[in-house]
Amino acid sequence: MNVYDILQNPDEHARFAAYLDKLGHVADANEVDLVRRVLTDPDQTMAQSAVLRHLDRRAAGLHAGPAYEGWVQAMTQATINHPFLAQRLREWSLFRAITLKLPWQPEDLLASSNWLQLKAAAGTNTEAIEILAEAGRTKQIRNTARTSLNHRSSN
């Protein structure tokens, strides 16, 4: 089934599942085109949700390695007209910098979404965890960071 066939299905739940399946099996060479085509679905909330799941899955697998940079540039171009998706890619890049101990700015972390703050609070970078324990946006983020720090000091 191709994307055109998927678009013909009036049930957005079926289209969502079909998009996730297609995105989960797409060859690297076809990924940008497929992401762009999914984002043409008239139900933008559903389409962006499917692409977001795909981006999170791919970024989780790529962020620590050298292939990430080229991939994130290509995905940034594919999602350029979708601010939420572009923001998620920027946050994956910040998470990558924090995790790999590359240069990053504390104010960028503090300005990031709850999603990224929570992910970093449960991560391995002590500097990021300390910042979030003190100034994380929500009580859950601050508590997660404090738990991470306490776990580190007890080991």
Image (cartoon, rainbow, N blue to C red):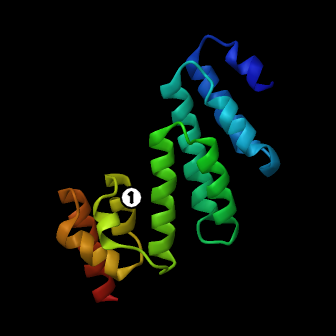
**What percent of the width, then of the height, locates residue 106?**
31, 72
The answer to whether residue 6 is above or below residue 125 is above
Classify residue 109 by image quadrant: bottom left
Q: Please name the residue shown 26% across and 78% down the image.
A: 130
As rendered, which of 45 and 40 lies closer to the eye? 40
**What percent of the width, then of the height, locates residue 2?**
80, 25
For label 1, count other residues whose C-alpha is less than 10 Å away and answer few (under 14), some (14-19) or many (20+): some
Classify residue 26 by image quadrant: top right
**What percent of the width, then of the height, locates residue 59?**
59, 57
Residue holding disc 1 = 116
Please state if 91 lies on the left or on the right of 139 as rendered.
right
Quarter of the image that includes the N terminus: top right
Quarter of the image that includes the C terminus: bottom left
Mark 1: which amino acid? Leu
Please state if 111 lies on the left or on the right of 8 as rendered.
left
As rendered, which of 9 and 82 lies closer to the eye? 82
Q: Please name the residue shown 25% across and 80% down the image.
A: 150
Q: Please name the residue shown 72% across and 36% down the image.
A: 34
The answer to whether residue 3 is above or below residue 116 is above
Indicate the secondary structure of the residue bearing disc 1: helix
The answer to whether residue 27 is above or below residue 105 is above
The answer to whether residue 138 is above or below residue 9 is below
**What percent of the width, then of the height, locates residue 10?**
61, 10
Q: Please name the residue shown 63% across and 22% down the image.
A: 15
Q: How many marks?
A: 1
